[in-house]
Amino acid sequence: MKFKGADILSTKLFARNDIEKVMRVAGRMEPFASKRKLSDILQGKILAALFYEPSTRTRLSFETAMLRLGGRVITVPAMETSSLTKGETLFDTGKMVQNYADVIAMRHPKEGSVTEMAEGADISVINAGDGPGQHPTQALLDMYTIRKEQGKIDGLTIAMAGDLKFGRTVHSLCYLLAHYKVKLIFVSPKELKMPVNVCEFLKKKGVKFSVESDFDKVIKSGVDVLYCTRIQKERFENEKEYLKLKGVFVLNKKKALTGKKTMTIMHALPRIDEIATDVDSLQNAAYFRQARNGVAVRMALLALVLGKA
Ligand code: NCD
């Protein structure tokens, strides 16, 4: 894929080469992400950060990535302060924002919304999460984290647990992992299963996966990576349904120690009650390092789409 000027809307469009390229460039960005070196390769470039849904990590790491590479950031503070509430379409907003910025990072509660804006804007639009749909930059930083923690991706058994129905991070991650020789295990309550379209894609690609409901058993089976997810409260139609499923899988230190000694524990964060704080002290609790990796990976993506990598 040609990165320069591209929209990053979904991981479905990534080939193995593209994933490797992002990881390679992210590796080169590490000194700048950690401030060991300074860079101004994106000087003169402007990122429009349009977050119409809550965000801490994604938004701040995008902004930091841009600023630490010498670029600048403009923003609309929230949905309520944007013209969308006056009824402007995302397409039109995209047409406007392209006059003010060189690249857009956008998050919105509706699946497909980022694509609508991308159709209006001629500059690169990066999906920072579209409802229960996709979250490609998170999945790329997840791949980067797995590689860094485990030293490889091929050959691993990776379990994804929790809200696999509404969890956009795991949807995006599956499409990327489909290019590697991995075994996937999906652990969720039956109400929150991995969507059929993702499973169909994996089948077509010949990726081995199994569907389980016993969290403890999966940990004991010796998986290499355990990726926990938050039950996506905001996607439920009624609160009662959410409360029924909240807290289904809780990982604590005792449980984590029943797993493989080298099991990498991941979570896109925020965590609610999926991972107890006593897990944090384990060497293989990788979720805070995972969040940190977001800066280097988003630096890589910004540099690539702006043709400056
Ligand atoms: C995730 C998201 O927004 O989808 N968070 C993130 O970007 N780090 C996961 C979540 O909200 O549960």
Image (cartoon, rainbow, N blue to C red):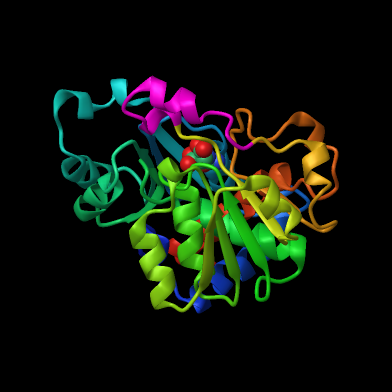
Say which residue appears at 61% left-offset and 49% top-offset.
294
Q: Is residue 296 magenta?
A: no
| Residue 33 placement (x, y as % from top left) | 68, 50
| Residue 159 placement (x, y as % from top left) | 62, 56
Q: Is residue 240 magenta?
A: yes
- Is 76 positioned to the left or the right of 275 in the image? left
Question: 87 and 260: which one is in front?
Answer: 260
Question: 92 and 151: which one is in front?
Answer: 151
Residue segment shown in magenta = 233-249
Q: Is residue 221 visible?
A: yes
Residue 132 falls in image quadrant: top left
- Is 223 positioned to the left or the right of 26 in the image? right
- Is 94 positioned to the left or the right of 128 in the image? left
Q: Pick the quarter of the image with the N terminus.
A: bottom left
Say which residue appears at 61% left-offset and 67% top-offset.
23
Say which residue appears at 54% left-offset and 59% top-offset.
140
